[in-house]
Amino acid sequence: MPSVLRDRTYRRLFGAQVIALTGTGLATVALGLLAYELAGADAGSVLGTALAIKMVAYVAVAPAVAAVADRLPRRALLAGSDLVRAGVALLLPFVDQVWQVYALIFLLQTASAAFTPAFQALIPEVLPEERAYTRALSLSRLAYDLESLFSPALAAALLSVVSYDRLFLGTAAGFLGSSALVMSAALPRRGRVSTGPRPGAYAKATAGTRLFLRTPQLRSLLAMNLAVAAAGAVVTVNSVVYVREVLGLTAESVALALGAYGAGSMSVALVLPRILENRPERRVMLTGALLLPAGFGALGVITAAHGGDWRRPALLVTWAGFGAACSMVLTPAGRVLRRAAPEGDRTAVFAAQFSLSHAAWLLTYPLAGWVGARAGLGWATGALGAIALAAATLAARLWPAGAGQPRAAVARTGRGHVHEHEHTGLTPGHPHLHGARRAGAGWRHSHPHFTDELHAAHG
């Protein structure tokens, strides 16, 4: 795993990700305390609205940014987004109205929606060899899981010596540090755009979504995103209810339950690079998706039980199982996205994944909270479990065996699985034909396999 950190550019980008995640974790704790100071007992409503604003920003802004991302210097886009986020963090301690919180959160999440897809699309260019990229995906998953465990502990330690508003200074420092590391990294130059005439703004904003809808493995990923969101929502929203109300445990046990989810995710992220060397993404990801309904079945038994000491370890095992299954879906997703589109369209595809996956969370978050509060945990578990089962089943049907997977006849090189094929109907000088050779009435060349308008005929 540490071998990929020998790459200087990736090491700096990964450092930027870790520092920014730590700052985000501090902001999460500080924002909750700020909401309580402004709204008192209504703090939960404020946070719920802020979370909805976050998801709306992610869903709406990421595709729009992708439409203009290729016209902007990547270094300026990434570093500028970090600077905006740092500025917002510095302003948050001074707000005294709830609407100001909402406005600043929207601005903060808009910057995040610009940063994250562009950052994710950059990594496969920095690490073009598939094995190294897979290890980078696992490291990224570990960073997210460790942040969920480390940031609350760091915030608790800081709150013992400073007031909560000083945590926003740590958030700003994290984003400033991320910006500095991005600026210092030697980013690869943009590749040639693999399309002809420049499309309009609407076409560019929807390019990633259209690719998702016509590509079997990406349509399947959409369904798997919904299954993951169902499991993640019940863990995020209802952990405190299960621990405090159902099991009657202490507040510290809530952190233990969330830690079990993170531990399950991390354990899978550590072993997936080796597994993916011998197993196709389809098998790994669909296995994870199909395990999620089984987890809801176990959770239903725990929810229906009226007593028993066995429920506490059972809940921890279920949460760890959810984390492991979600990691089996999310960690290899970057490999599938990279293979689905050429370099010039990669930001649009990652932006579509970012936007569409958060649309699923926008559905499951309120479902977990509102149904659980009004009808009871049993109904919430049943509803989310039904969604996970339907989504996982649909995902298996949408991704036929072999679709999007490297073929036996395709050569594997240091750049990944290289597909040799022929194009007809493209005019000489077309950007995608750079380096191609004449082959009868067409042009023949090879590159890592992906799916777009130019390659639909090649599978």
Image: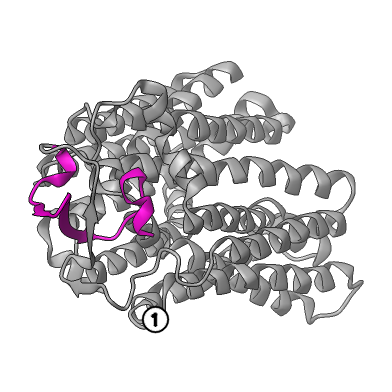
Secondary structure under badge 1? helix
Q: Which residue is at 64% across, 63% downward?
A: 392
Q: Which residue is at 86% across, 55% downward?
A: 379
Amino acid at circle 1: Ile
Q: Determine the image quadrant of residue 86.
A: top left
Q: Position of residue 222 (x, y in %)?
A: 55, 52
Q: Determine the image quadrant of residue 10.
A: bottom left
Q: Determine the image quadrant of residue 446.
A: bottom left
Is residue 170 something that shows in the picture?
A: no
The residue that label 1 is drawn on is 275
Q: Position of residue 396 (x, y in %)?
A: 60, 66
Q: Which residue is at 81% across, 80% downward?
A: 309
Locate residue 427 relative to residue 88 in the image: left or right: left
Locate residue 198 relative to residue 186 in the image: left or right: right
31, above or below 132, in the image: above
Locate residue 82 relative to residue 105 in the image: left or right: left
Say which of 1 and 396 sits in front: 396
Say which of 431 and 290 sits in front: 431
210, above or below 314, in the image: above
Say which of 183 and 364 sits in front: 364
Is residue 59 something that shows in the picture?
A: yes
Magenta span of residues: 430-459
